[in-house]
Amino acid sequence: MTLHIKNGLVVDTAAATTQVVDLFLMNGKIAGIGSAPAGFKVEQTIDAVDCWIMPGLIDCQARLRDPGEPEKANIESETEAAIKNGITTLCIPPDTQPPIDNSATVELIHHRNEMFGHQARVYPIGALTRGLGGKQLSNMASLRDNGCIAFSNAKQKLANNLVQRRAMEYAAGQRSLVIIQPLDHDLLGNGCAHEGAIATRLGLPAIPEAAETAALAKDIELVAQTGARTHFGQLSCARSVDMIRRAKAKGLPITADCAIHQLFLTDHDIGNFDSNMLTIPPLRSQYDRDALREGVADDTIDCLCSDHQPHEVDAKLKPFPSAEAGISGLDTLLPLALRLVEEGVLPLAELITRLTLNPATILGLPGGRMGIDEVADLVIVAQEAHWICRAGDFISKGKNTAFEGWDFRGRVTHTLVDGNIVYQA
C-alpha cells in the first residue's frame, strides 16, 4: 500500500527537530518527505493535523511472559497493547520459562509472534549462561545466528566474577552487546524498599544503594578489562548516573537506560503499602529521581524503557514484602515520556530520541529514524487528547499500574509497522 500522511508535525530524531511536513510511504519505507517521489500514486491518505508523527517506540526491556507464564500475559495480549500505545518494537529479556538459552526457544518466540502477535517486532535477548544458572556459558554464537540481539543474565546471579569475565570476553569476541542490570544479590537480600527513612518508618526490609553501585563499579571494571560493549539497564541511583558519566568520559563502550517510572515515583509513594509501587530496583529518593532526570537530559542515560512486568491480580494482593515486583508499563511509556516534555526535562525531539533512535542504534535494530528509505515504523499521536489512566482500560493482561488516575496528554491514533496500519483508534 502507498500512503500519504499530511499536515502532521514530524519529529525528526536524528536532527532533533520538529516540522509540519507530509510523508509518503511505499513498500514499507519512507519514500518521500515534503514531496512525493516520481510516479507515486496515493492509495490511502491520513490527515494528521494537530498530531505528532514520530518513529515507532522501541522498548528495550519488556517482559511478555511468553513462553511459560500464561496467567500473567502472552505475546498476543502484549503485542496488541504495544501497538495501541505506539510501541512497534519489543526487546524481551531471557528470563522466560524456559529461558532463552537455546535456538529452539528463540524459534518458538518468533513462531508465536508470527502466529498470534499483532505485527509488533519482537526481539529476544539471549541468556549469558545456560538456564540462567550463572555457571556455564550459553552458546552465544548459535543464539546470535538465530536472532538474539544481545545477551544478558537478567536479574539472575552469576556464580562469580570469573564467569562474568569469561562471558563478556565471549560476547566481545562475537561483537555482541552485553546487557547487565547491576545487582549485588547479597546486598539485595530480601529487601523490598529503598534504604531510608520511609523503609525504617514502615518497617520494611531495605535495599541499600550499594546493592546497585557496588555491582556497577565491578561491572565497569570488567568492561575496561574485556572491552565488551555493555549496556547497563534499569539504573535507579544518583551515584550510578555519576559512575556511568565518568566511565563514558573515559571512552569505555558503555550505554545505559532507566525505567521511566523511576523518573516520576519515589520511595514516598509506597507509604500506604501499595504493592503496585513495589519494584526491583526499588523506588529511590527524590534526590535519586532528580539525578536520573539530569542523566536523561545530558545523554548519560541513553534510553528509557517501560521495564514492563505484567502480573496476575493475585501476585499483587500479598503483603508488600512478599508481593511480586514490577509495573505493567506498556500503556504508560509514551504518556509518561510526553509528561517529561511538559515538565521541561527535554524538548520533544530529544526525548523521543531516547525511545527510538538511541535504542535502535545501540541494539542494531531497524527504525528510530525519519529519512528517505528508512523503515516506515511510525506512530501518530493526537497532541491535545487528554485521558485518565485506568488499569481496567489496559489491553495488556497486566493491570498492575502505579499510575492509576493520572491525567495524561497525548493519545495514539495510528501505529504503522513496515508501512502497514496495525492500529487505528
Image (cartoon, rainbow, N blue to C red):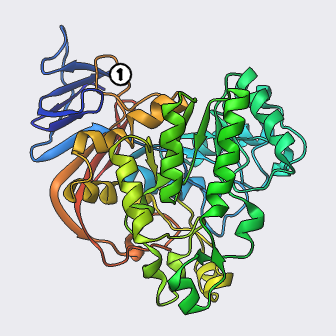
- Residue placed at 53% from the left, 53% from the top? 240
Q: Is residue 410 placed above or below 7 in the rendered structure? A: below
Quadrant in the rendering for residue 401: bottom left
- Residue placed at 19% from the left, 32% from the top? 17
- Residue placed at 29% from the left, 32% from the top? 13
Image location of residue 83, percent across then percent down = 40, 49
Q: Is residue 15 placed above or below 400 in the rendered structure? A: above
Does residue 333 appear in the picture of this structure? no
Three-letter code for the amino acid on which mark 1 is drawn:
Glu
Q: Quadrant of the C terminus?
A: bottom left
Q: Is residue 217 placed above or below 311 in the rendered structure? A: above
Quadrant in the rendering for residue 324: bottom right
Q: Secondary structure at mark 1?
A: loop
**Going by the image, does 337 lie left or right of 409?**
right
Q: Quadrant of the N terminus?
A: top left
Q: Is residue 397 placed above or below 117 in the rendered structure? A: below
Image location of residue 143, percent across then percent down = 75, 31
Quadrant in the rendering for residue 176: top right
| Furthest residue in direction top, as rendered | 38
Image location of residue 159, percent across then percent down = 87, 51
Report the number of discs: 1
- Residue placed at 37% from the left, 34% from the top? 377
**Going by the image, does 402 lie left or right of 215?**
left
Q: Which residue is mark 1?
A: 374
